[in-house]
Structures are given as C-alpha cells and as structure tokens.
Amino acid sequence: MEMALWRIEDDRPRSLAASGIGDEQRLESIIADDVEILGLGPLMLLGRQVFTDHESRVDLLALDEEGTVYVIELKRDRTPRDVVAQILDYGSWVRRLSAERLAHIFESGQFARDNTFSAAFADRFGRLLPDVINESHRLVIVASQLDESTQRIVEYLLEGFGVPVNAVFFRYFRDGTSEYLARTWLSDPAVAEQRALKPKRPPGEWNGVDYYVLFAPEESRSWEDAREWRYVSAGGGSRWSNSLFRLRPEARMFVHLPQHGYVAVGRVVSGPVPIGEFMVKSGDREISLLDVPLRNESIKQHATDPELAEYLVGVDWEWDVPASEGYWERGFFWRRGTTVVELRDPATARKICAHAGIPDDEAEGTEAQATNKTSSPAH
C-alpha cells in the first residue's frame, strides 16, 4: 500500500514529499521508546540488541500478555534474502528459549530498571505470568521502505507455509520543523495471525457452527453490560471488529474473557451493526443502546465513526456468568490477535458445555465425523 500525506492550506491540499527516515537506528529507538507504534497491541519489551547463541543480535525482543514472544528486526540496508534469512534464524533460536532464559534476558537488559521479570509482567499487563511462556512466537520485519522482493518472500512464507512472519513499514514525512511517521502492514495482523502456524494441539474437524469469541473488557467496554443487554462487541478499529462479520444467526459462540476464562455460551440472533444501530428491549418497546445507561459509557464514544465505532452482535445466552466465575482448564483453546475464529477443538466445547449443563450435540457430531473419517477404509 502506498501512503501519501497532504497539508490542507486555504482549503487546498499541499502534498508532502515522503522519504526514508535516514538512520534506521533512529527508527529502532522510536520503537523501543513506544513499542505500541507497531500496532500489535500491548507488548512488554524484553531486550534490545540481544545476543543469540550464534553471536548475532536481535534488534528487539518482546512478549505479549499470552506469553507469545515477538522478534522485531529492522531491515536496515540488507538485501531481502539476508533480512528474511536472518529473522528466520532468530526464530529458530527463539523457539527454544525457556521462561528462565527470557527472564534472564529481561533482567540483565535496559528495560528491567531493577524490576524482576514476573513483577514487570504484572505491572505491564495487570496479571500473573501465564503457566506456559513461549509456546509460540512471531517474527516482524520493520523497514522505512519495503521493496517488492521482500514482500514476495514474506507473503510466500506466511500464505504458503504458515510461517509466523510479517512486515511493517513506515514512511517518513517532514513539514517544516514537524516530523511525521505513517505505518502500514504487509498483511493485516489479524489476518496474518489466522495464516500463521496452528497451535501444537491438532484441531478437530470444524462443525460449521461453533466460534470462539474474545471479549476484551478494556477501558471501552463492560462484560456485565454485555451480559445484561445480550451482545458481544469489538471496536477501536477494523482489525478488531471485522471478524465479527463471521457470526451469522444460529451460530454458537463460546466467549472467552482474558484472565478469567470462558464466561458464556450463546446463539447469534442479529448483527453485527454499529452501536448506533443496535436496539434492545426496554419494557414493551425497543430503544437504541445509546439511550441506555451503561456501567461503562465509553463504549459509545466513537458511535459516529465507522472505523472506530463499537460493533455489536446480538445473542441469546444459553449460559453466562460474571467474570469472577469464569471457567478455565489447562489445554483449553484460546487465540489472541483477532476477535472471532472458528472453534475447531471439540474437547474444549464439550468440557464447557458439561460445566454449564448445556447439551452439546454439535461437538459430539464433530467428533463422530472425525471418528468416521479415521475408521473408514481407504479407497
């Protein structure tokens, strides 16, 4: 995607010329100062210029709240073949790092500031370290400009083989004494997450009905509001809201609340629509959710912005509980980086339904299909 920037002057656009940022060491420093500029969500930086076991150095190493490790490497002046080979080599090293080794990297680096690994994680994400760290990793190439050859190689690895690699590039603009950075991804992070390698647990055959829904109760939304008014939602950008459009009437959703577990099972009845179009029953009439007093009114703040608005899907709950009563077992399916994905793990669905006292014909049918396929003679 080509990016351009204009200054409006007397109601007329004046184009600003784009250029490279010059020294990509400066871009690395900007990212190190605020890693969220990458658009990957909250990350905790573990180290900068981290030495590997092969005497090479990773530009930036980071961790997300689920324990996924991120290798962030600047392209600098290297050829496409060199930079891709380098980051794949880093991936082969990172995937073997234990939680103890990652803690050592953090505590001996510049980002610790006399803090321990576990304490810094709790400060950053408001939760304890996950039981499993570095079950998966992601590779990110950063460039001030991205050439076609690098694009082709990264797309081939991601789309053809599910290698968890993506590229982001920044265009630099200068307007007098003001400087600007504009960012775009080679592949939307949510899409790249879907194309990346699948979890180590082999997925079951999808029954065409069950979906996993990530409900992130950040500052802009309340799970108790969603329970009461029968919806799930996402917003703050198309990266989060687009996947809601997979949910069709009669689809069954299993709602996961980060740090709490599964909190609901329900059937889709409507949507998705922007919050300004979502209607709820109040007594014997229907009114807009915008007219309903909510526990968290922040969900309404971008109601008129098609990009940032919260989008809602109407649902009939078959089982729903407060966050404090969320259900979680080790080995349950979970996914970060996107709001809705197909739930291809019948074991997770079966256990949740059993816990909730819900009949689970769908999951049983899925397992039966898988059994029949396994036991059928070859033709």
Image: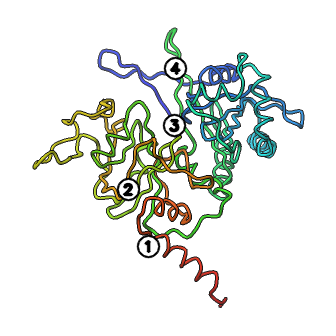
Mark 4 and mark 2: span between their CA atoms? 48 Å
Q: Earlier in the sequence, mark 1 or mark 4?
A: 4
For this view, does 308 lie left or right of residue 69? left
Q: Earlier in the sequence, mark 3 or mark 4?
A: 3
Q: Earlier in the sequence, mark 1 or mark 2?
A: 2
Q: Mark 4 sits on what residue? A: 180
Mark 3 or 4, closer to the camera: 4
**In the image, what residue type sits under mark 2?**
Trp
> Vertically, is 364 above or below 305?
below
**In the image, what residue type sits under mark 3?**
Glu
Mark 1 or 3, closer to the camera: 1
Front-most of residues 365 and 27 = 365
For this view, does 16 lie left or right of residue 86? left
- Dot 3 falls on a residue whose secondary structure is loop
Mark 1 and mark 2: span between their CA atoms? 16 Å
Q: Mark 1 sits on what residue? A: 361
Determine which of the numbered discs, if any, sits on residue 2 in the image.
Answer: 3
| Rendering coords of residue 248 (x, y %) | 35, 60
Within 10 Å of the Cα at label 1, are there few (<14), some (14-19), or many (20+) other Cα atoms? few
